[in-house]
Amino acid sequence: MIEEIRDINDYDYSDEDEEFEDNELEKQLDLYAPSIGRLVMSFNSLEETVNSCLVEEVRNHDDGIGNIIISKMSYSAKVDLLKSLYTYIIHMCGSKRFLARLEPLFQGLVESGTDRNSILHGAWDELNKNSEIKFKTIVHPDGPKHKYRKVTVEMIDKMSQDFYDLSEKLFEFHEDFGQGVGTDDSKV
């Protein structure tokens, strides 16, 4: 993700060239809307895959316990819990070959959540002619700063496809994991 952090006082309100007129802004936002919709759907698909994997890992006799556990959890908490469960089972069962696939997969899951949040929580009403949106305010010792990122329809569409691809990789990992845990790593 390409982002820039700026001091909140760095914005030059006198430079009106960077801002859209209201009718221009509406036209720009209309261009982004379908891609943002696809992003929401693809991220929801990814989160549902995380949910399914979690529910299966904590299953006792039915999916009820797993669904109760995840019902109030954020996406990032689900990702952390799923990684902890996989790591624990890997170490308990001696199936260390899954560790090499685990870290990059979960790094992708964390980055997906961050990317999604930057788009969905972005200040789209402040989109400027440089295609930048403010998506987060952070506090530094020297004062608050805003995080900005450049956005394009193509970038959001690629992000959506990446979410679908990651969902597929997670499902494949989960299937392999379910079939391979507890098998002797030296025989695989």
Image: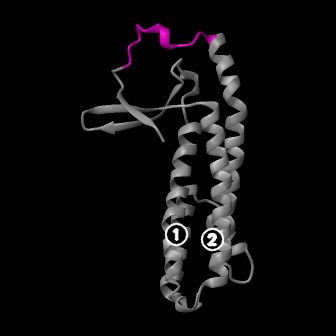
The residue beneath circle 2 is 173
Give the numbered dot on residue 102.
Answer: 1
Q: Amino acid at mark 2?
A: Phe
Residue located 54% across and 24% down the image: 131
Q: Which mark is residue 164?
A: none
Quadrant assignment, res 171: bottom right
Does residue 24 appear anywhere in the picture?
yes
Question: Is 17 a magenta residue?
Answer: yes
The local secondary structure at tag 2 comes to helix
Q: How is the image coloured?
A: one colour
x and y percentages locating residue 7 in the rendered image: 33, 27
Residue 58 painted magenta: no
User: Label 1: how many residues lie within 10 Å, few (<14), some (14-19) or many (20+)?
Assistant: some
* Predominant secondary structure, magenta span: loop
- Between 162 and 74, the residue placed more toward the observer is 162
Identify the residue shown where x is 41% and y is 11%.
13
Q: Specify the amino acid type for callout 1.
A: Leu
In the foreground, 31 or 154: 154
Give the residue displayed 44% in from the left and 36% down from the top.
Answer: 3
Q: Position of residue 85 (x, y in %)?
A: 54, 75
Q: For residue 62, what is the image quadrant?
A: bottom right
In the picture shown, does residue 77 fall above or below 122? below
How far apart, in angstroms, are the residues tagged by discs 2 and 1?
Answer: 8 Å
Q: Are marks 2 and 1 in contact (CB under 8 Å)?
A: yes
Specify the quadrant that holds the C terminus: bottom right
Vertically, is 79 above or below 127? below
Which residues, given as a range, are shown in magenta? 11-22
Whether residue 58 is visible here, answered yes or no, is: no
For residue 12, side relative to residue 79 (left or right): left
- The residue at the point 48 percent across, 8 percent down is 17
